[in-house]
Amino acid sequence: MTDSDAAAKLDTSVPHSARVWNYWLGGKDNFPVDRAVGDDFANLYPDITVVARHSRAFLKRAVTFLVTEAGIRQFLDIGTGMPTAENTHQVAQAASPDTRIVYVDNDPLVLVHARALLTSTPEGRTDYVDADLHDPERILEAASATLDLTQPVGLILMNILGHVPDIDQAVAIVRGLLDRLPSGSYLLTADGTNVIDGPAFEEAIAVWNANAPLGYHLRHPDQISRFLEGLEVLEPGLVPCSKWRPAPDAAGEDLREVDEFGAVARKP
């Protein structure tokens, strides 16, 4: 798909999760309809901006760990959303410039901005695949043009599995991706939960689902833990994103529990 084809497919009359998330993170790549739904959501659940910030911080810490301590040099980031600050390739290549990253999304606006902004270091490589989460075979086939799938891969599924209504189907998608990756690969995942401030978050999610074509489903951590079955889950396990290996000097707001749980796990 060319950039002009992608632009032609844009529908600015309905909100899109990637653009609303971009708005909550302070980005500019969103439309009035995204901001309106984002504001309605935040009025019901003001902590959504806190969740978004901790989600991004968790991603940064986890990717840095995988590069610097686990030796991962290639990532498959599915449902990447709009480019903002400290994207996966920026974090990974800052730690090791030869890292390769493939981003996957199926929103035409994301496609346009990813091609323009997700540039690589000379030593590494960054690529973009226009594909749907529900088609793991297509994703892996396309990613293999950039990644060596015989070597360990960091698979990133951040805030994307909640868009799959059926938990069994979501688990099957994760399995379909991990089964094709070699031993020593890692899963980095996080999604919204309903155990810390569930009623307010559920009410806000209902607003989102009434206005957006792609719904989102908050899940109990016990359900999210199903994505980790058969894997070696790293300490501290599946926890609120703010609690996953925080900086030594973290305190106060930086350690506040949020309704998004994340984990990093290794394929044995």
Image (tube, helix red, strand yellow):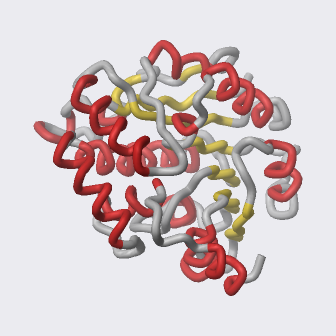
Give the percent coordinates (x, y) of residue 212.
Answer: 46, 51
Residue farthest toward the bottom in the current orientation of the protein: 4
Task: Tell whether 20 sits left or right of 183.
Answer: left
Height in image: 116 above or below 238? below
Q: Is residue 121 visible?
A: no
Residue 251 versus residue 215: which sits nearer the camera?
A: 215
Residue occupying image coordinates x 38% and y 51%:
56
Height in image: 49 above or below 31? above
Give the percent coordinates (x, y) of residue 34.
Answer: 37, 63
Instruction: Give residue 145's quadrant in the image.
Output: bottom right
Residue occupying image coordinates x 49% and y 29%:
263
Instruction: Give residue 253's quadrant in the image.
Output: top left
Task: Tell whether 182 sits left or right of 49.
Answer: right
Height in image: 52 above or below 120? above
Height in image: 231 above or below 1? above
* Quarter containing the N terminus: bottom right
Q: Is residue 25 visible?
A: yes
Residue occupying image coordinates x 79% and y 51%:
139
* Quarter containing the C terminus: top right
Residue occupying image coordinates x 21% and y 40%:
45
Residue farthest toward the left in the current orientation of the protein: 252
Give the percent coordinates (x, y) of residue 167.
Answer: 61, 22
Give the percent coordinates (x, y) of residue 134.
Answer: 74, 41
Query: Count of labels shown?
Result: 0
Task: Tell whether 92 sits left or right of 134.
Answer: left
Residue 170 versus residue 128: which sits nearer the camera?
A: 170
Residue 100 versus residue 253: which sits nearer the camera?
A: 253
